[in-house]
Amino acid sequence: MRSYTIDCAHLKDEGSFWQAYLAVTEPEDAGYFGCNLDAFWDALNGGPGWPGECQLMFINTANLKALREGRFYQVLRKISRDSKLVEVRLE
C-alpha cells in the first residue's frame, strides 16, 4: 500500500492545506477536486481527488487547530476516523 506524508508545519490557511494534499498525492482527477472538507470526504470515498488505496499521514498538524477556530481540525479528525477506503492519520 502506498503511503503519503503531508507536512503541515508551514501551512497557514486552508488553501495551502489543499495545495499540499494535491501536490503530494497527485490524484488523476485533481481538477475536479473541490478543495474543501466535503470534497475531501468524497475523495476518500472514491470521488474526485481520490488518492487511491493508501495511507495518508498529516504531520505537524498543531497549526491546523487554529483554522476556523478549531472547526477545520475537528472535522478533519472526524473524516480520518470515518474513512473506510483510505487510512488517515493526524500527528
Image: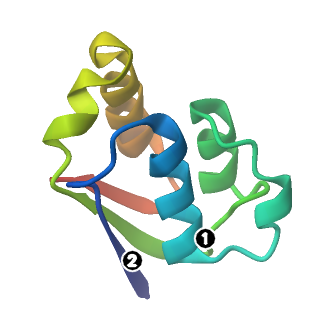
Q: Which residue is painted at 39% across and 77% down in the image?
A: 4
Q: Which residue is painted at 32% across and 29% down in the image?
A: 73
Q: Which residue is mark 2?
A: 4
Whether 84 is drawn above or below 22: the answer is above
Q: Position of residue 19 (x, y in %)?
A: 55, 57
Task: Report if residue 85 is visible in the image.
Answer: no
Indicate which disc, 1 or 2, sits on the residue closer to the N terminus.
2
Count the numbered circles shown. Answer: 2
Q: Quadrant of residue 9?
A: bottom left
Q: CA distance from mark 1 to mark 2?
A: 9 Å
Give the amino acid at mark 1. Pro
Q: Are marks 1 and 2 in contact (CB under 8 Å)?
A: yes
Whether 66 is drawn above or below 64: the answer is above
**Farthest residue, direction top:** 69
Give the amino acid at mark 2. Tyr
From the viewer's perspective, is 80 left or right of 54? left
Quadrant containing the N terminus is bottom left
Secondary structure state at the residue bearing disc 2: strand
- Residue 78's tag is none
Neighbours of disc 2 within 10 Å: few (<14), some (14-19), many (20+) = some
Pick the residue in front: 9 or 1. 9
Look at the image and name its color scheme. rainbow
Q: Quadrant of residue 60?
A: bottom left
Q: Which residue is mark 1?
A: 51
Q: Which residue is painted at 47% across and 76% down in the image?
A: 54
Q: Position of residue 76 (x, y in %)?
A: 39, 35
Secondary structure state at the residue bearing disc 1: loop
Task: Report if residue 60 is visible in the image.
Answer: yes
Whether 20 is drawn above or below 61: the answer is below
